[in-house]
Amino acid sequence: MKREDIISKAFSKLGNNGSYNDNGGERYQKAVALLDSFYENIATDTTFLFNAITVKLTSTGQNEQGEYRYNVPIDCLNVINCQNINRGLENYREEGEFIYSLSSELFIHYCKKLDFDELPDKLFNLLVCGLAKELSLAFNAYNDRYQLLDAKYQEEKRNIIYQQGFNHNVWE
């Protein structure tokens, strides 16, 4: 999936077929910034599990309170939840680049940072509609299209949620 393709389709949805050809122009640069911001928002949203991963962490020691310290994975955008060895949800706290827990073994479910090249193809329409919606707010000429684009975005969002399923249990 390429940024240029997403931006091109988003401008097409707005009815502007010329802005995406000028990748040095103000509108194109604004679209790049909005796309990055929009992607960051959906990547950390726990509604979407396209970038979720579960891993077992190894403790790096204990603090004075008896809590085990674990390093947060370098590709972690946000932690969804943690489980202990008995598969029960575990209380934890994040502090800087560490996770602290009373459990001696910890499994974490988190949103992993992905590059645009790694994104699943099923997100293409969601990103296009979301970017078009954001562009309609950014430029006054397209404000009248916001409601239509928001409805299309919500439809694409529902489609993604339906595809991943409602009964998704990462621990099984």
Image (cartoon, rainbow, N blue to C red):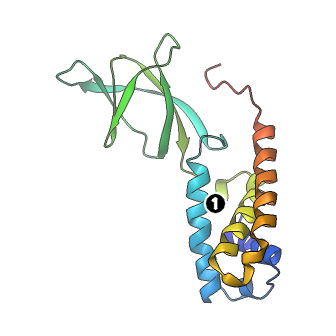
Tell me where residue 111 sits by quadrant.
top right
Query: Left of 130 or right of it: where is 73?
Result: left
Residue 171 in picture, x, y percent from top left: 61, 21
Identify the residue shown where x is 20% and y is 25%. Answer: 63
Residue in the foreground of this view, choosing between 70 and 148? 148
For the C terminus, the quadrant is top right
Q: What is the three-letter code of the residue carrying label 1?
A: Phe
Query: Left of 36 or right of it: where is 63?
Result: left
Residue 162 in picture, x, y percent from top left: 80, 38
Tell me where residue 20 sits by quadrant.
bottom right
In the image, residue 17 above or below residue 37: below
For the N terminus, the quadrant is bottom right
Identify the residue shown where x is 75% and y is 61%. Answer: 150
Residue 83 in picture, x, y percent from top left: 49, 20
Secondary structure under tag 1 reads helix
Query: Left of 64 or right of it: where is 95?
Result: right
In the image, residue 27 above or below residue 67: below
Residue that label 1 marks: 116
Residue 20 visible within the image: yes
Identify the residue shown where x is 74% and y is 69%. Answer: 146
Residue 24 in picture, x, y percent from top left: 61, 88
In the image, residue 76 above or below residue 38: above
Identify the residue shown where x is 67% and y is 82%. Answer: 140
Query: Left of 73 or right of it: where is 80?
Result: right
In the image, residue 136 above or below residue 19: above
